[in-house]
Image (spheres, helix red, strand yellow):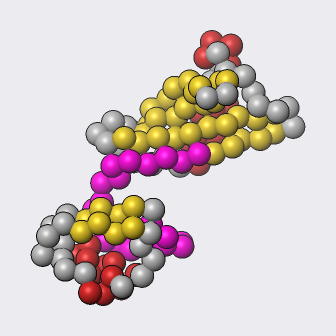
């Protein structure tokens, strides 16, 4: 249980789902690493001060003419970066977004603006 965690030093929480003890840990511990949080809906307000150090957001964009396999990656301190799958096992870097996670609409608009021939991207079927 997270309720018994000692917060006098760094704390690693794996698959955090208990809201009240997680909030206490985020307020009290000098350093908290949360891996694979399991919160549904809105994150605790204490996460507003958090720095996302590593994030992978796989996505698929589909239409009547095919689609794209996409990944938005963040490896701190680098910005969020959009990659589009080119061939099995390879991705093409297509855009960077900065230090905040990009909105879904921004990801879609960026994908639709990519020149497929210039970037060497093939649509998936």
Is residue 65 visible in the rendered image? The answer is yes
> What is the x, y in percent for residue 41?
53, 72
Q: Does 40 lie within the magenta span?
A: yes
Q: Is residue 42 left or right of residue 29?
A: right
> What is the x, y in percent for residue 119?
61, 17
Q: Quadrant of the C terminus?
A: top right
Q: Tell me the residue at 44%/48% (across/down).
A: 55
Q: Tell me the residue at 47%/40% (across/down).
A: 73
Q: Tell me the residue at 51%/26% (across/down).
A: 93
> What is the x, y in percent for residue 40?
54, 73
**Extreme-left residue of the structure:** 8
Q: Is residue 11 left or right of residue 82?
A: left
Q: Is residue 3 left or right of residue 62?
A: left
Is residue 47 visible in the rendered image? The answer is no
* Image quadrant where residue 10 sits: bottom left
**Which one is in front, 25 or 119?**
25
**Which one is in front, 106 or 11?**
11
Q: Does 123 lie within the magenta span?
A: no
- Report the span colored magenta: 37-58
* Image quadrant where residue 35 sits: bottom left
Give above or below for 82 relative to 86: below
Q: Quadrant of the N terminus?
A: bottom left
Give above or below for 45 relative to 64: below
> What is the x, y in percent for residue 116?
68, 19
């Amino acid at each position: 249980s997270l309720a018994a965690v000692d917060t006098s030093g760094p704390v690693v929480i794996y698959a955090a789902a208990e809201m009240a003890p997680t909030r206490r840990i985020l307020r009290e511990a000098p350093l908290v690493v949360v891996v694979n949080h399991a919160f549904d809906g809105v994150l605790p307000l204490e996460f507003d001060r958090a720095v996302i150090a590593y994030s992978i957001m796989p996505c698929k964009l589909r239409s009547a003419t095919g689609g794209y396999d996409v990944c938005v990656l963040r490896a701190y301190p680098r910005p969020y970066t959009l990659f589009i799958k080119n061939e099995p096992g390879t991705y093409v870097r297509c855009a960077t977004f900065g230090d905040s996670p990009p909105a879904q609409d921004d990801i879609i608009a960026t994908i639709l603006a990519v020149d497929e021939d210039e970037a060497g991207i093939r649509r998936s079927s």
